[in-house]
C-alpha cells in the first residue's frame, strides 16, 4: 500500500520560511516523479512544483517561481518543498503526490495517482 505523509506545515509570518517534507512508503521513490499542490479555502487545487525521478529536472508554478524549491532524497524516500519569502496568499493546505510517470512534468491532478493527506500552511501578514 502506497502512503504519502506530509509534515512541516505551520504558522509563519510574511517573509518567513518553511520546509515541507513528504515521506513515501510502499513504493520505491525513484520509480516516480513527484509533485506538490496546494488548495486554499474556496479555491481549486493549484499546481506548485514537480520533480523528475532522479531530481534532474523540475518545474514550479508561476506564483511560487523564485521563492519555492522542490527537491528529493531517494535514499530517504522523501520529497521536500522549501518555501521562502512567504506571503499571506500562500496560505493553503499543501499536498504531495506521486506522479504516474517519472519525468516530473505533470501540472494537472490527473497526472498523479497517489496523494498525501495534506499539511496546513498559514502565513500571517
Image (cartoon, rainbow, N blue to C red):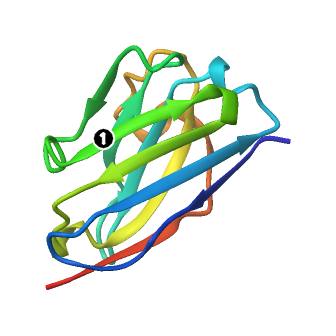
Instruction: Tell whether 33 sits left or right of 18.
Output: right
- At label 1, counting other C-alpha atoms closer than 10 Å, the crowd grade (few under 14, some 14-19, many 20 or more) is many
Q: Nearer the viewer, residue 105 or 68?
A: 68
Residue located 61% across and 40% down the image: 78
* Residue at the limit of the structure toward the right, as seen here: 1
User: Which quadrant holds the C terminus?
Assistant: bottom left
Residue assigned mark 1: 69
**Quadrant housing residue 75:** top right
Instruction: Tell whether 62 sits left or right of 33.
Output: left
Q: Position of residue 81 (x, y in %)?
A: 40, 48
Instruction: Tell whether 41 sits left or right of 90.
Output: right
Relative vertical location of residue 25 with respect to residue 94 in this rendering, above or below: above
Q: Nearer the viewer, residue 43 or 54?
A: 54
Instruction: Tell whether 13 sits left or right of 118.
Output: left
Residue located 39% across and 33% down the image: 50
User: Which quadrant holds the N terminus?
Assistant: top right
Q: Secondary structure at mark 1?
A: strand
Q: Position of residue 92 (x, y in %)?
A: 35, 70
Relative vertical location of residue 54 with respect to residue 109 in this rendering, above or below: above
Q: How many marks?
A: 1
* Residue at the limit of the structure toward the bottom, as seen here: 125
Residue located 77% across and 30% down the image: 27
Q: Position of residue 15 (x, y in %)?
A: 14, 70
Q: Position of residue 69 (x, y in %)?
A: 30, 41
Relative vertical location of residue 7 with respect to residue 32 in this rendering, above or below: below
Relative vertical location of residue 82 with respect to residue 15 in this rendering, above or below: above
Residue located 58% across and 25% down the image: 100
Amino acid at each position: 500500500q502506497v502512503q504519502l505523509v506530509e509534515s512541516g506545515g505551520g504558522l509563519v509570518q510574511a517573509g518567513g520560511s518553511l520546509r515541507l517534507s513528504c515521506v513515501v512508503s510502499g513504493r520505491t521513490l525513484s520509480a516516480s516523479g513527484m509533485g506538490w499542490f496546494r488548495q486554499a479555502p474556496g479555491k481549486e487545487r493549484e499546481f506548485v512544483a514537480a520533480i523528475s525521478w532522479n531530481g534532474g529536472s523540475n518545474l514550479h508554478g508561476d506564483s511560487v517561481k523564485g521563492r519555492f524549491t522542490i527537491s528529493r532524497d531517494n535514499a530517504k524516500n522523501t520529497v521536500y518543498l522549501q518555501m521562502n519569502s512567504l506571503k499571506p496568499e500562500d496560505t493553503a493546505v499543501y499536498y504531495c503526490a506521486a506522479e504516474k510517470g517519472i519525468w516530473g512534468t505533470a501540472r494537472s491532478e490527473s497526472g498523479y495517482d497517489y496523494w498525501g493527506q495534506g499539511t496546513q500552511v498559514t502565513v500571517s501578514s
